[in-house]
Amino acid sequence: IEAEWKLTPVSKIRSLIDGDLDGSAYPVEGQAVTWIDRTDARIGVVGRPEERASANAWSAFESALAITIDSAEHVDVAIHRSGLGTAARAAHTVITAAPGSRGTVILRSTGSATLSENVEIVVGDGAELTVVSLQEWDDDALHLASHFATVGRDAKLKHIVVSLGGEVVRVNPSVHLDGNHAECELYGLYFADAGQHLEQ
């Protein structure tokens, strides 16, 4: 059930909430990424779906995009996906910052899409990670995302959501501080034109 204050246009995203989703791998550009099977031990470490669209995507994905930061020197990883098409699709991403690592991960989305996804973010003890989710979809795109993060002892996460395109875009982050001196900063920015619903 949607909270009234959110005013999400549920009729537009119905196919993502309870329809069949294509959970196959999709084209992606970027470095330091691999595809892992849904049975991989990294899946489900951080969180579980809290609403129906997230649960539908969780049930439907076949492979997950895995991004690993394991360098003590700061590294930048930029991922770009585009051309997902208009068929309803599920996706799953796991971002892992190993203990003591430093890095920034940029997830950029463009083109058309009808997508429900879950993103798991694990920040190990003493690690520092920035995750930027950049939505620059075409005007017809429908995108629902749940981001689950856990931040370990003496670790820091900066989570930034920037939504600039799409017909309906909803990004819902949640964070669990899982140790002494764990820190998290969450920021959001959006710019909507007439007829767009951007929510985070």
Image (cartoon, rainbow, N blue to C red):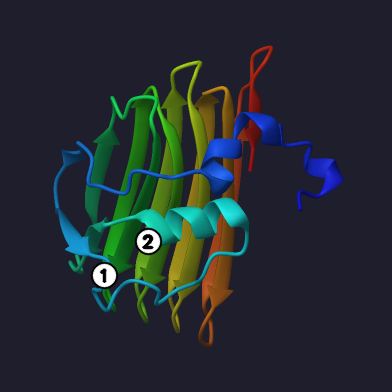
Which badge, 1 or 2, is on the more N-terminal residue?
1
Secondary structure, mark 2, is strand
Q: Is residue 131 left or right of residue 18?
A: left
Q: Is residue 191 left or right of residue 24?
A: right
Q: Amino acid at mark 1?
A: Ser
Whether label 1 touches label 2, CB < 8 Å = yes
Whether residue 194 is visible: yes
Residue 5: % across, % down: 84, 43
Check disc 2 and report the residue beneath it: 129
Q: Residue at x 52, y 42 (%)?
A: 16
The image quadrant of residue 80 is top left
Question: Residue most toward the front?
Answer: 20
The image quadrant of residue 85 is top left
* Of the pair 167 and 158, the residue shown nearer to us: 167
Q: Amino acid at mark 2?
A: Leu
* Of the pair 200 and 132, the residue shown nearer to us: 200
Residue 178: % across, % down: 51, 83
Residue 3: % across, % down: 81, 49
Numbered circle sitting on residue 101:
1
